[in-house]
């Protein structure tokens, strides 16, 4: 019932686990009583993290990134950082991207919730700056996986986006404007110093992939992809 994808770039670092898990839309109940039941967060934590300690961000489309050391809810933030082993960092998405970063030299894990507001407010650069300031981490050492997210095939936006982003990340088709969120994320990672060959971006578009990923744009679902990164403990 639960699908998952892993990330090839993490296979060289078995001490760190990075995965995206979701209930395919065909199995996800709609709104209403049954939906509330299956999407109760406490149960979902059990299922998605296999009952291991987890931190969930109460995501608010900000650029706030927090250091976390124990299980629970990190209030009002969109980024989690830890050097604690056996602690799942969870970012839940349905069209936005999770940007999962690992520094294998210092063994630090990061999980970011990045939508258009995230790239606009530069959460990626701020998170990597924080790693440098708080841990002495170097962006060139980091590896990054970017989860499935809405692609430029489907991410229709309003004309105001021309005021926010460079034209290179906007495409016009049939009089409508489309935003390349993943392209923008890739550019910001590279600008922050992450080598291009250490970045893996899922090609799946949440809205149109055959994987039946949760997509808010497609059907206003409350279902989410659970994007999880964890440093394995002793
Ligand atoms: Zn698409």
Image: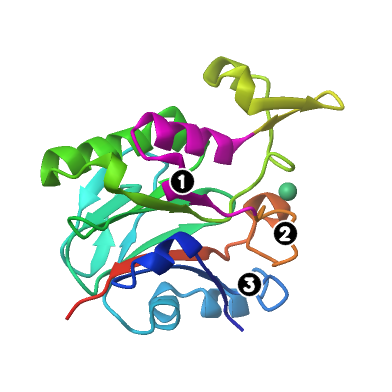
Element type where label 1 sits in the image? helix
Q: Quadrant of residue 81?
A: bottom left
- At 38% from the left and 78% from the top, the residue drawn is 49
Is residue 4 positioned above or below 124 on the image?
Answer: below
The residue singled out by tag 3 in the image is 32
Residue 175 percent location from the top left of the image:
84, 23
- At 36% from the left and 37% from the top, the residue drawn is 123
The mark found on residue 197 in the picture is: 1
Q: Quadrant of residue 132?
A: top left
Is residue 200 positioned above or below 6 on the image?
Answer: above
Q: Which residues are magenta?
A: 180-203
Sort mark 1 into few (<14), some (14-19) or many (20+) by Cα contacts within 10 Å. Answer: few
Left or right: 70 as drawn, with respect to 174: left
Give the residue furthest to the top: 163
Question: Sequence order check: which comes first, mark 3 or mark 2?
Answer: 3
Element type where label 2 sits in the image? loop
Q: CA distance from mark 2 to mark 1?
A: 25 Å
Q: Is mark 2 within 8 Å of ligand 1?
A: yes
The mark found on residue 209 in the picture is: 2
Residue placed most toward the observer, 29 or 230? 230
> Mark 3 or mark 2: which is in front?
2
The mark found on residue 138 in the picture is: none
Residue 133 percent location from the top left of the image:
14, 38
């Amino acid at each position: 019932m639960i699908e998952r994808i892993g990330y090839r770039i993490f296979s060289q670092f078995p001490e760190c686990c990075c995965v995206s898990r979701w209930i395919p839309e065909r199995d996800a109940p709609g709104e209403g009583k049954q939906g509330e039941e299956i999407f109760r967060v406490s149960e979902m934590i059990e299922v998605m993290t296999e009952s291991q300690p987890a931190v969930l961000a109460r995501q608010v489309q900000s650029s706030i990134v927090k250091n976390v050391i124990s299980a629970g809810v990190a209030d009002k933030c969109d980024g989690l950082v830890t050097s604690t082993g056996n602690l799942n960092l969870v970012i839940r998405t349905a069209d936005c991207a999770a940007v999962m970063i690992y520094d294998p030299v210092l063994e630090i894990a990061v999980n970011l919730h990045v939508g258009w507001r995230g790239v606009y407010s530069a959460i990626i650069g701020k998170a990597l700056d924080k790693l440098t300031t708080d841990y002495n981490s170097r962006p060139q050492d980091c590896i990054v996986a970017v989860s499935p997210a809405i692609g430029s095939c489907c991410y229709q936006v309003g004309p105001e986006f021309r005021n926010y982003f460079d034209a290179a990340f906007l495409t016009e088709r049939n009089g409508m404007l489309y935003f390349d969120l993943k392209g923008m994320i890739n550019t910001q990672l590279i600008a922050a110093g992450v080598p291009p060959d250490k970045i893996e971006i899922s090609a799946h578009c949440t809205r149109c992939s055959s994987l039946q990923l949760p997509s808010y744009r497609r059907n206003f679902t409350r279902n989410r992809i659970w994007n999880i990164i964890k440093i394995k403990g002793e």
